[in-house]
Amino acid sequence: KPIFILNGPNLNLLGKRQPEIYGHDTLEDVERNCAAVAAEKGFEVQLFQSNYEGGLVELIHRAREEACAIVINPGAYTHTSVAILDALNAFEGPVFECHISNVHKRESFRHHSYVSLRADGVMAGFGVEGYALCVRRVCSLLAG
Ligand code: DQA
């Protein structure tokens, strides 16, 4: 089973949106990079993006059957969504939360994360490299 890399609202604009905060790499670059890291350890990744809260909930439900682990950047829903937390609580494998920017250095409304109540680990402020670091961690956890 692949590792699902789930991305929330506005992350389809990655590379174009506020590059001073989020950098110039796109989600395609993220997927390529994560796939390379996973392949070294014999794993695969599948990347998805949705601008809708319910779309992310449904992708997490799909992960229950189809994924061995979830790396998720829920975007702004990080700070608001009990529904995404509940969906993640219904997923049994490892969950890693990834933020490109250091949310703790930004506005106070970004300091709280519902998803952190479920996440096995959290990355913030490592740029898009954070995704690959999460994938690396998932691989070593699952390799036992
Ligand atoms: C983000 C941080 C969130 O606060 C913001 O709403 C995003 C991106 C990040 O990757 O740094 O959309 O999750």
Image (cartoon, rainbow, N blue to C red):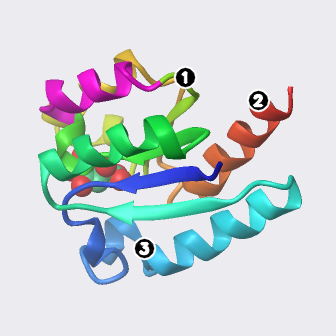
Residue 79 visible in the shown view:
yes
Residue 84 location (% of width, % of height): 24, 32
Disc 3 crowd rating (10 Å Cα; few below 14, some 14-19, many 20+) is: some
The Cα atoms of the two marked residues, 1 and 2, are separated by: 11 Å
Dot 1 or dot 2, earlier in sequence: 1
Q: Which residues are magenta?
A: 79-91
Residue 121 location (% of width, % of height): 55, 27
Disc 1 crowd rating (10 Å Cα; few below 14, some 14-19, many 20+) is: few
Camera-side residue of 67 and 71: 67
Which labelled disc corresponds to residue 91?
Answer: none
The image shows residue 9, relative to residue 36, as above or below, that is: above
Circles 1, 3 touching at the beta carbon (< 8 Å)? no
Report the residue marked by disc 1. 120
Residue 87 location (% of width, % of height): 29, 28
* 42 relative position to 67: left or right: right
Circles 1, 2 touching at the beta carbon (< 8 Å)? yes
SS state under label 3: loop
Residue 60 falls inside the magenta stretch: no
> Label 2 sits on what residue type?
Leu
SS state under label 2: helix
* 34 relative position to 31: left or right: right
> Label 1 sits on what residue type?
Asp
Which labelled disc corresponds to residue 23?
Answer: 3
Residue 143 location (% of width, % of height): 85, 34
Q: Name the image quarter holding the C terminus.
A: top right
Dot 1 or dot 3, earlier in sequence: 3
Rendered residue at 51%/51% (across/down): 4
